[in-house]
Image: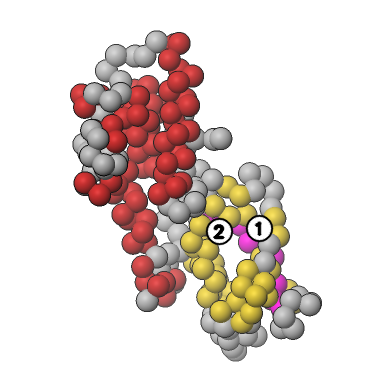
Amino acid sequence: MVAYASIDDLLPLFETAPKDTRRPRLEGLLEVATSELIGECGGRDYFRHPTAGSRTWTIDGQGDGVLHFHEGLLELSLLEISLDGGQTFIELDPAHYQLLGARYLEGELPGDGEPYFHVRLRPPPIGLYGCFPRGQSVIRPTGATGWATAPRVLVEATAERARQLAYADPSYSGSLPGPDEYSEGGQGASDRWPQLLWNWLRNERLRFYACSM
């Protein structure tokens, strides 16, 4: 498994440099911390999919004018729709849709280092369609999803969490402990998320709040 943070991100967090014999252990803890975070995000990660090139997949249509890619949309080389339940597909002209950031209603573009999160149709007379078709697997994108690189705050938070896991003693905690709800039974400082990581999880859960309204 690939970790969000590298050993070079983790080592500066120690006041005394760990011995070289501990490096494999620390690198493993970075992977554990990454796996924990993916679990907290419901299985969503911040890697690129696929790792290189592009892929084609299908998604369901809700009958509105927006596609939601909350996992991130790095590239969209082709977008097709089916008007006959998935038997045949029609290629959409890129001029007929927009790639936007999290706040698509405001026409927001992604921030630095962020992928796109939404695709919005341009309604007629600019585009040909006012909404995407409704149905199962009637929209077929080709491109890449996820993030090109993990956000820097996530890299730092993962390194801090790995440091927490390395030492049970509170004096070696990676950061100030987060709120009690991120403590696994209150078993000590090493079982609580660093504040930086808690802040990240909270902000990510709020990023697409408007999409659920």
In this rendering, the answer to whether 117 lies above or below 13 is below
Left or right of residue 54: residue 182: left
Describe residue 123's horizontal placement relative to residue 139 as left or right: left
Q: Which mark is residue 30?
A: none
| Image-quadrant location for residue 209 | bottom left
Give me the residue at 21% from left, 46% from top. 180
Query: Which residue position is annotated with label 1?
Result: 143
Pick whichever, 52 or 123, lies toward us.
Answer: 52
Q: From the image, give the main secondary structure of the stretch colored magenta.
A: strand
Note whether residue 52 is visible: yes
Q: Amino acid at mark 2?
A: Leu
Q: Which residue is mark 2?
A: 73
Q: Is residue 14 above or below residue 130?
A: above
Residue 176 locus on image (x, y percent): 21, 36
Quadrant for the N terminus in the image: top right
- Tell me the CA gap for discs 2 and 1: 8 Å
Q: Specify start and end residues of the magenta stretch as a single range.
A: 72-82
Q: Quadrant of residue 37?
A: top left
Q: Is residue 43 magenta?
A: no
Q: Secondary structure at mark 1?
A: strand
Count of marks overlaid on the render: 2
Secondary structure under tag 2 reads strand
Foreground: 87 or 40?
A: 40
Residue depicted at x 28% and y 25%: 168
- What residue do we see at 29% from left, 36% from top? 191
Say whether residue 41 is left or right of residue 17: right
